[in-house]
Amino acid sequence: MTTVPTAPETVKPTRRLLGVELLTVLGLSLGASGVGALISFTGSLTETLKLGQQVATLNGSRAPGRPWLDLVWQLYYIGRGLMPVVLVGYLLVREDVSLRVLGFDLGQKLRDLGRGAAVAAAIGGSGLVLYLGSQAAGYNLTVAPSGLPDVWWRIPVLLLSAWQNAILEEVVVLGYLLRRVTQLGWTWPAALAASSLLRGSYHLYQGVGGLVGNIVMGVVFCLLYRRWGRVMPLVVAHALIDTVAFVGYALLAGHVSWLPTP
């Protein structure tokens, strides 16, 4: 009688494997973005132009003069930008949990929306003031949140870009990172510092204001995540902040005097 071999029991990952996993996820996503931002900022510092006279475009055209091809490229990069979230979801499933363990679900829609809107209102206004002040003082590049052509798909793509940024950053840098470093035995202050500094690092290409502002935002988001146990309200907050920045810039640039433009 032939016996069917049983599947081996799942082996719990060691701390070393968890550390390698974390570094791999970050190396494929926002950790790599942090290194790229440092290189970009180094280049900006060594330019002959002052920082305030240089421009950082966040959502630029990828096929100027060819709107349909440009649209395809925009959608491609938005979809590709979410793949680290898919990877994190897969790794959590192997851990016998899911993204729900991070609070990334629709189980508390109204509560998450209300909390997210309140956080966005508090963070967004202070962030704008910090940006305007640092740009005027010459510590920050002029940030152009939209460099897309004035075509029918511009606003929808900016909305999708805002949500893609929010989902990627909050799932990876907030929920997943804090979960893994806690499993590695890090203290809460160390975990908070790691998440906040990482968030600031990949915004350094914007200048000192982008670095400092996002470190502060990271601290606030970490504290709120620890209190609520859910990333979803912070995804909502981040998406609303980026939506106002992206769409607001597209509609107001060149029409108001207080908004720096290239």
Image (cartoon, rainbow, N blue to C red):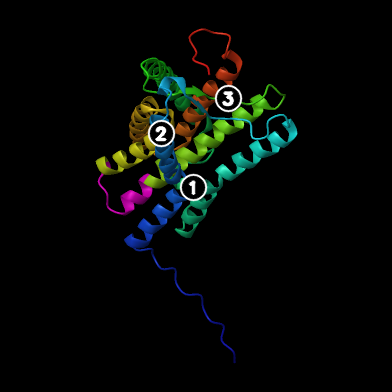
Disc 3 target residue: 146
Q: Position of residue 241 (x, y in %)?
A: 49, 24
Camera-side residue: 139 or 160? 139
* Amino acid type indicated by mark 1: Leu
| Residues in magenta, as a range | 178-188
Residue 230 appears in view: no
Disc 2 target residue: 41
Mark earlier in primary sequence (1, 3): 1
Disc 1 crowd rating (10 Å Cα; few below 14, some 14-19, many 20+) is: many
* Amino acid type indicated by mark 3: Ser
> Is residue 5 shown left or right of residue 141?
right
Disc 3 crowd rating (10 Å Cα; few below 14, some 14-19, many 20+) is: many
Disc 1 target residue: 99
Camera-side residue: 124 or 227? 124
Mark earlier in primary sequence (2, 3): 2
Q: Residue at x 36, y 16 (%)?
A: 137
Residue 9, quarter of picture: bottom left
* Amino acid type indicated by mark 2: Phe
Mark earlier in primary sequence (2, 1): 2
Q: Can you tell which of label 1 and label 3 is closer to the viewer?
A: 3
Q: Can you tell which of label 2 and label 3 is closer to the viewer?
A: 2
